[in-house]
Structure formats: structure tokens, C-alpha cells
């Protein structure tokens, strides 16, 4: 489990195709991180298992992961957000992020207002918008953000300067593809309502 508070950023060193549908991604290991094989790490909001640490971090991507995330279009040199999982007793900031990306979304508009960067994001799968609510939480590229506005086709988030500068959002442009995970509480609440109608 993660919180959506990004620990650091790093770069993709290499991506290779392991078979017809799978891939291996190698990310440069942050200097001060002590890791072991089997550790879970959020990479751009995707919960991945470290398969090798020698000296960088290798991850195996399944076809489903590639299908649901922007890793289908990732390339060596791309900057990624990293977060280590929450440990018992850790301070809990952000919101509960599972690392189970629902869909990707493209940036429709970037606007600056005062000290805030305003992003309008259009999800590839519009059905997820039923799980998104104004003043609620959403994870974008693994970052815990508050939804400011939501419509039938998009949602809007405001980014503070610190987040803009210390995550890969500051490198994004109009049309950039982002990983989106809805709030798990909203997901289960809607599912419960669906089952109660049966």
C-alpha cells in the first residue's frame, strides 16, 4: 500500500521485450535506497515487484500492466515517480493508493493561475469518472491529488509548486499520457451499490 506522496524521481535505463507480450523495465536505483529482491515499489503509480537489484532495479511487466498503463509507450530516459510502500507505524499522508492503475489519461490543458498549475485530464476510459468526485482524491502518476472539478469527459486537479518541481508532472505537456488510479473507497462503494441492486 502507498500514500501517493512521491519519495523521489528516477529514470528508466532500459526496456526490453521478454516475450511476445511481456517486458522488463530497468530503473536507475536511487543512491540511498536499500532494496532487496521482491520489494514492492510504486513506479509512476504502478505497484511493481523488484525482480533484480544489480545495481539498478529490474521489474517484469505483465501484458495486463502494459495494457492499463502508459508503460506501453514508455522509453529509456523517461523520468518516473518512485514511492516505497507504507510501513507499519509510518506517518500517513496523502490517501490510500494501491498501485492498481485503472486507466491512462491525457492532459487536455495546462494552465497556470497564481502559484498553481491547473491540469485538465481526459481519461481514456470515461467510465472511471463515476468514481471521481470534487474534493475527493485521485492518484495521477502515483501522486495523491485532490480533484477540483469533474465533468462527464474530464477532471481537473491543481498542483502546488513543490509537487510540480519534485515529480515528473513538471515535465509533462499537453497530450502527455498519465496513469490514473481512482480512490479505492469510491470504487468499493459503487461496487456495493451495484451488488445491492441485484
Image: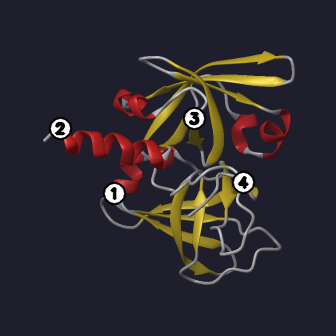
Q: Are marks 4 and 3 in contact (CB under 8 Å)?
A: no
Q: Position of residue 130 (x, y in %)?
A: 39, 30
Mark closer to the chain start, 4 or 3: 4
Question: Residue at left 61%, top 53%?
Answer: 76
Please give the residue where the numbered disc 1 appears in the rendered image. 63
Q: Are marks 1 and 2 in contact (CB under 8 Å)?
A: no
Please give the residue where the numbered disc 4 appears in the rendered image. 93
Which label lies toward us, 1 or 2? Answer: 2
Label 2 neighbour load within 10 Å: few <14, some 14-19, many 20+: few
Q: Is residue 153 left or right of residue 190?
A: right
Report the disc number at residue 136: 3
- As rendered, which of 107 and 130 lies closer to the eye? 130
Label 4 neighbour load within 10 Å: few <14, some 14-19, many 20+: few
Mark closer to the chain start, 2 or 4: 4
Q: Position of residue 56 (x, y in %)?
A: 67, 73
Q: Is residue 122 left or right of residue 142?
A: left
What separation in Å lies between label 4 and label 3 (alpha carbons)?
A: 14 Å
Colouring style: secondary structure
For label 1, the SS is helix
Please give the residue where the numbered disc 2 appears in the rendered image. 197
Mark closer to the chain start, 1 or 3: 1
What separation in Å lies between label 1 and label 4 (alpha carbons)?
A: 32 Å
* Residue at the extreme left: 198
Quarter of the picture holding the C terminus: top left
Amino acid at each position: 500500500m502507498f500514500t501517493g506522496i512521491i519519495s523521489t524521481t528516477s529514470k528508466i535505463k532500459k526496456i526490453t521485450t521478454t516475450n511476445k507480450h511481456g517486458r522488463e523495465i530497468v530503473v536507475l536505483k536511487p543512491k540511498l535506497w536499500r532494496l532487496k529482491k521482491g520489494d514492492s515499489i510504486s513506479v509512476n503509480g504502478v505497484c511493481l515487484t523488484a525482480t533484480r537489484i544489480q545495481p539498478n532495479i529490474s521489474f517484469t511487466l505483465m501484458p495486463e500492466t502494459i495494457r492499463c498503463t502508459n508503460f506501453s509507450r514508455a522509453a529509456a530516459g523517461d523520468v518516473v515517480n518512485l514511492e516505497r510502500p507504507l510501513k507499519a507505524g509510518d506517518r500517513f499522508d496523502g490517501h490510500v493508493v494501491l498501485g492498481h492503475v485503472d486507466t491512462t489519461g491525457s492532459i487536455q490543458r495546462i494552465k497556470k493561475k497564481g502559484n498553481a498549475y491547473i491540469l485538465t485530464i481526459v481519461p481514456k476510459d470515461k467510465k472511471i469518472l463515476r468514481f471521481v468526485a470534487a474534493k475527493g482524491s485521485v492518484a495521477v502518476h502515483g501522486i495523491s491529488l485532490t480533484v477540483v472539478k469533474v465533468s462527464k469527459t474530464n477532471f481537473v486537479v491543481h498542483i502546488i509548486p513543490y509537487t510540480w518541481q519534485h515529480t515528473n508532472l513538471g515535465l509533462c505537456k499537453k497530450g502527455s499520457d498519465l496513469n490514473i488510479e481512482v480512490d479505492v473507497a469510491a470504487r468499493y462503494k459503487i461496487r456495493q451499490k451495484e451488488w445491492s441492486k441485484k
